[in-house]
Image (spheres, rainbow, N blue to C red):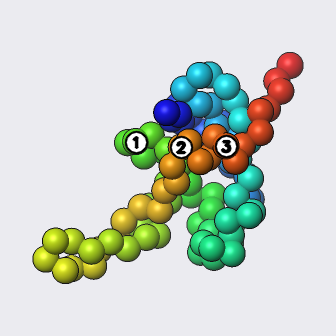
């Protein structure tokens, strides 16, 4: 299983990260923007961070239901294995 060690760069709508294997890879989120339209707002997209799993997240963009039925804000995040498969290696000099 992959996980993300760090974010190197965030641009509208790509994020360059370092995975656990020390591989630097660029993730293009444009194919996901129709499914997650809130990420089309550049100021929202640029607020990406790494959560405790660790993977990329956007705090408070998702909703979840507590056991008592209360709806609360939750982070929008993506499986790091999916992000790895979506990404391309970055060749550094």
Q: Which residue is mark 2?
A: 80
Q: Which mark is residue 53?
A: 1
The C terminus - image quarter: top right
Q: Say if mark 1 contacts mark 3, CB within 8 Å.
A: no
Q: Which residue is mark 3?
A: 85
Q: Say if mark 1 contacts mark 2, CB within 8 Å.
A: yes
Give the distance between the C-alpha atoms of the residues marked 2 and 3, in whole angstroms. Answer: 9 Å
- The residue at the point 63 percent across, 73 percent down is 35
**Which element carries disc 1, helix, strand or loop?**
loop
Residue 68: quarter of image: bottom left
Residue 84 position, x and y percent, is 64, 40
- The residue at the point 52 percent across, 54 percent down is 78
State left or right for residue 18 relative to residue 69: right
Disc 2: CA contacts within 10 A as few (<14), some (14-19) or many (>=20)? some
Could you say which is closer to the camera, residue 24 or residue 82?
A: 82
How many numbered circles are shown? 3
**Which element carries disc 2, helix, strand or loop?**
helix
- The residue at the point 56 percent across, 58 percent down is 47
Q: Earlier in the sequence, mark 2 or mark 3?
A: 2
Q: Earlier in the sequence, mark 1 or mark 2?
A: 1
């Amino acid at each position: 299983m992959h996980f993300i060690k760090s974010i190197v760069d965030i641009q509208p709508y790509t994020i360059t990260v370092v995975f656990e294997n020390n591989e630097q890879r660029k993730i293009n989120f444009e194919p996901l923007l129709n499914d997650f339209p809130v990420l089309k707002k550049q100021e929202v997209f640029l607020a990406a961070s790494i959560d405790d799993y660790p993977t990329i997240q956007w705090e408070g963009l998702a909703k979840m239901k507590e056991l008592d039925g209360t709806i609360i804000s939750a982070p929008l995040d993506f499986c790091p294995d999916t992000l790895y498969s979506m990404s391309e290696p970055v060749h550094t000099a």
